[in-house]
Image (cartoon, grey):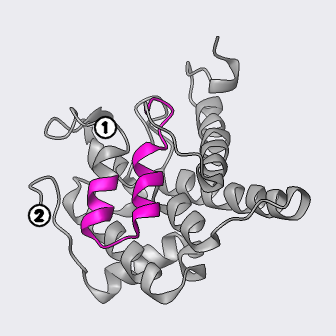
Amino acid sequence: MSSLYTIQSGSASQREEVLRAMPRLAELGAPLREQATTAWVSAWLASTHDSLESMPYSLQAPDYRLLDHTNEVADAGILLADYAEERWGVGLDQDILLAALLLHDIDKALLYTRAGGAVAADPGRAGLPHGVLGAMLLKEAGLPDAVVTLVGTHAATSPLKTGEPEAWILHYADLFACDHAFRLAPGTVPFFQRT
């Protein structure tokens, strides 16, 4: 167990709220769906946020909600995966991919807090690179190693990348949705326009 979070099942209403907030969780097989729901409840309850809706996506796009980004990544990832399978014959583990798409930024619930209306790095967790804390939480919540690895290495700044096709799909779905959020944030340059 970590002092950074505690794995908690939460109440029935909290679990239902997570499932309502991320509709694609219902598409996961029963054991994986339950583990992913527990992971999100654990992150929420260990965070400084009163609700799932109040969790910010990033310091660069403080008004953009983490839930919106998560759902956009899941939707875009499924579209990319369907295309890759149908057009290119790429074999994917759909449950592992969908779990990674839905859980890839779970640590942002813990890494960011609101202070006086502004989004700031949580002082107790700010030293951890994005992806690492999420991977730790997911491992402790019993998620498969493949999901843990995808989440732990998905960040653009990660020095490690797996060669799995699920990592490739997650990468492009994440950047696509990230650039949408960045395009809406005043003064923030999307990745595709950076030199």
Q: Which residues, given as a range, are shown in magenta?
A: 135-158
Q: Is residue 140 visible?
A: yes
Q: Is residue 105 visible?
A: no
Disc number at residue 117? 1
Q: Position of residue 135 (x, y in %)?
A: 34, 54
| Callout 2: SS | loop
Q: Position of residue 178 (x, y in %)?
A: 59, 39
The residue where tag 2 is placed is: 1
Q: How crowded is the residue under tag 1: few (<14 C-alpha within 10 Å), some, or many (20+)?
A: few
Query: Of marks 2 and 1, which one's residue comes earlier in the chain?
Result: 2
Front residue of 89/142: it is 89
Front residue of 171/87: it is 87
Q: How crowded is the residue under tag 2: few (<14 C-alpha within 10 Å), some, or many (20+)?
A: few
Residue at the outermost front position: 163
Q: Amino acid at mark 2?
A: Met
The quadrant of the picture occupied by the N terminus is: bottom left
> Along the horizontal axis of the image, is 54 left or right of 95?
left
Residue at (33, 35) in percent of width and height: 119
> Along the horizontal axis of the image, is 29 left or right of 121?
right
Q: Nearer the viewer, mark 2 or mark 1?
A: 2
Q: Amino acid at mark 1?
A: Gly
The quadrant of the picture occupied by the C terminus is: top right
Mark 2 → mark 1, Cα distance in angstroms: 31 Å
Q: Position of residue 57 (x, y in %)?
A: 45, 44
Principal secondary structure, stretch drawn in magenta: helix
Q: Is residue 61 above or below residue 72?
A: above
Residue at (47, 78) in percent of width and height: 19
